[in-house]
Image: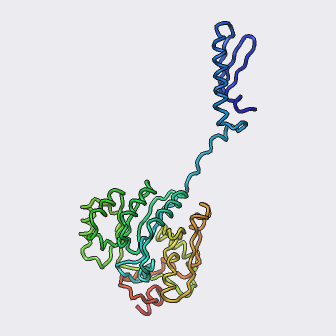
Amino acid sequence: MNIFKRIFSIEKNEDLLVINIFFFKIKFKKDISNKTLELKINTLEQEIKSKLSTILANEVRFFDMYIPPKKKMELNFLSIHLVDKCNNNCESCSHFCTLADNFKLNIKDFERQLTILSQKFHIKEIDLMGGEPLLHPEINTFFDITRKILPDTFICLHTNAILLPKMDETFWDSCRRNSIAFKITKYPTVEDFSSLLDLCLEKGVWIAGIINGKTFLHWMDKTGQGNIEENFFACKSKFGYCYILRDYRLYTCPTACYMNLYNSAFNTHIPEEKGIDIITASDEEIIKYLNTPLSTCKYCRNVHNLTPRPWRRSSRAEWEWDDAIYREQG
């Protein structure tokens, strides 16, 4: 049946004029006084047919007229390195920052990557980090771009806070304007930590979390004998989500993402994860990857079985990342 007839039609007989609109019938008795009305209805019928024809595309079924938009899947957490270098030189850094070069993320690349990912996922929280993100000279611009692309996302600056007293007022204005919260790792290198908290309070910036930096884990197992699945899910249960965006690819672990820094520094050949391409992969493929154990996991130890070691400055020695060798050398 023609879709128009199911929406609007007119039936005529000797005595009645019947107008059908969806499920309603309006009946008029045909007499001299209704001739003018009949003419108007006929004109209305032609106008409705003309307008509907541009929408209905002839025989399109009525329920095909509306296609609801695809709902985005959620990404609970995302982190991005603005720089790889750090000014704190921590032993056995899980991001290998002590081994990093002077990489600084390009603003345009950042904007393109985040735009692409935001079209696929609703990102609940994003951490701008490093390295030490305050080392990036365009930190304020990163705040502006992140808030523009992710208007409803919880945005955190993850910092060691060492440089906070040196930041100018434009930095603090950008933090307030873009509703940036701070996650601060409290290291033994910062003597007057309370004054840093007072500074944030004075500047009107919310501190979302204070992380204990007094101990570190030495988690690597260079023998490659670790249980891949057991280690993967142990990390998930202890640390939660560690998703990282880098070079248009998503990773599930900082060690896997930055293993090239370790291999380059010590001429080792631990497998380096390639991540998953956010441009070519489907949403479903990305979700599957984010929940799949990595080959790199066999070069780690189960984090639940490790003993935290006191924080120390890095000597950039290969052994400081491996718990078994650390016990012998450290």
Q: Position of residue 224 (x, y in %)?
A: 57, 85
Does residue 236 appear to the left or right of 131 in the view shown? right
Determine the residue located farthest toward the top in the rendered image.
32
Determine the residue located farthest toward the bottom in the rendered image.
329
Hey, which quadrant is residue 179 in on the image? Answer: bottom left
Q: Nearer the viewer, residue 148 or 229?
A: 148
Residue visible at 40% across and 80% down in the picture: 216
Q: How is the image coloured?
A: rainbow
Q: Nearer the viewer, residue 225 or 25?
A: 25
Vertical placement of residue 156 versus 20, above or below: below
| Quadrant in which the C terminus appears | bottom left
Vertical placement of residue 120 versus 100, above or below: above
Residue visible at 46% across and 57% down in the picture: 149
| Quadrant in which the N terminus appears | top right
Q: Position of residue 259 (x, y in %)?
A: 51, 80
Residue visible at 34% across and 56% down in the picture: 177
Q: Nearer the viewer, residue 238 or 59?
A: 59
Hey, which quadrant is residue 327 in on the image? Answer: bottom left
Q: Nearer the viewer, residue 217 or 112?
A: 112
Does residue 319 appear to the left or right of 46 in the view shown? left
Q: Position of residue 37 (x, y in %)?
A: 63, 14
Q: Position of residue 26 (x, y in %)?
A: 65, 18
